[in-house]
Image (cartoon, grey):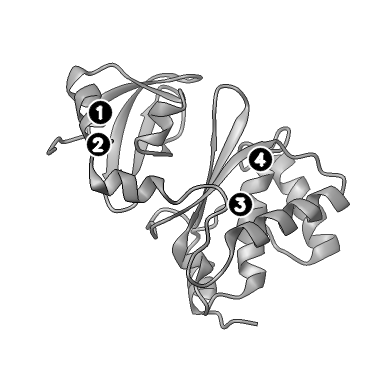
Amino acid sequence: MNLELKGKKVRHCSYGEGVITEFYERSLIIRIRCDNQPERPYAFPDDFDSGILLAEDSELIEFIAEFKKSVRYRLQASKTFGSMTPNKDVMKFFKESCEILDDLKIRYGTVAGVRVIDPNPEFFGLCRHTKDDVHLIDICSDVLADDIRDHDVYTIILHELIHTCDGGIKHNKKFREYGSLIERFYGYTIYSRIRLLCYKPIVLSSQKG
């Protein structure tokens, strides 16, 4: 199952033709650049299954089919909606984050699943959008470690939930408006880019409490 994914052409359901620029094998994340769009991360091979991405290269189609038969994929796919890490229950934080948005009358989109994935150098959380306007949220397992403050877990999950809100798909003015409202009433600072160098060490070195 050896295939160089970098450089393979794909088609995005909304943005058209694109090319794979990176493949992070451990966390099963690919980065794709489409015309006139910033480079974005996607889940492999899940976003091909959901219809967000379409493989047009015969080698890539064959590789995806073979990969889905592998033990590696079955282990990753077992981390589904409602799953728990050994340390923190991700669904507890997700449900309580939804309650925060409900309390603030912030209408969020439909989330079909919340998945815990391996640590990724690119992000702590990822919100993916399907063509049916349904959202899938990935949370990296290092966020749920015992030595990470609950406060920071809420901050990251709320960040991803805002991406499901009307107008909040990008880190734009509307995204910041939602974030400001959450910070004002609940004290969670919603950073525009979770993996900012000034923020990552604070989260990963913070103590539980």
Residue at image position (28%, 42%) is 23
Quickly name the residue at label 3. Answer: 192
Alpha carbon distance from label 2 to label 3: 37 Å
Residue 69 numbered mark, or none? 2
Q: Is residue 100 left or right of residue 77?
A: right
Contact? badges 3 and 1 (CB < 8 Å): no
Image location (x, y in percent) of residue 203: 54, 72
Residue at image position (72%, 48%) is 176
Quickly name the residue at label 4. Answer: 172
At label 3, counting other C-alpha atoms closer than 10 Å, the crowd grade (few under 14, some 14-19, many 20 or more) is some
Contact? badges 2 and 1 (CB < 8 Å): yes
At label 1, counting other C-alpha atoms closer than 10 Å, the crowd grade (few under 14, some 14-19, many 20 or more) is few
Callout 3 secondary element: loop
Q: Is residue 191 visible?
A: no
Callout 2 secondary element: loop
Which label's residue is closer to the chain start, 3 or 1? 1
Choose between 27 and 23: the one closer to the eye.
27
Question: Which residue type carries mark 1?
Answer: Ala
Alpha carbon distance from label 3 to label 4: 8 Å
Image location (x, y in percent) of residue 171: 62, 43
Alpha carbon distance from label 3 to label 1: 36 Å
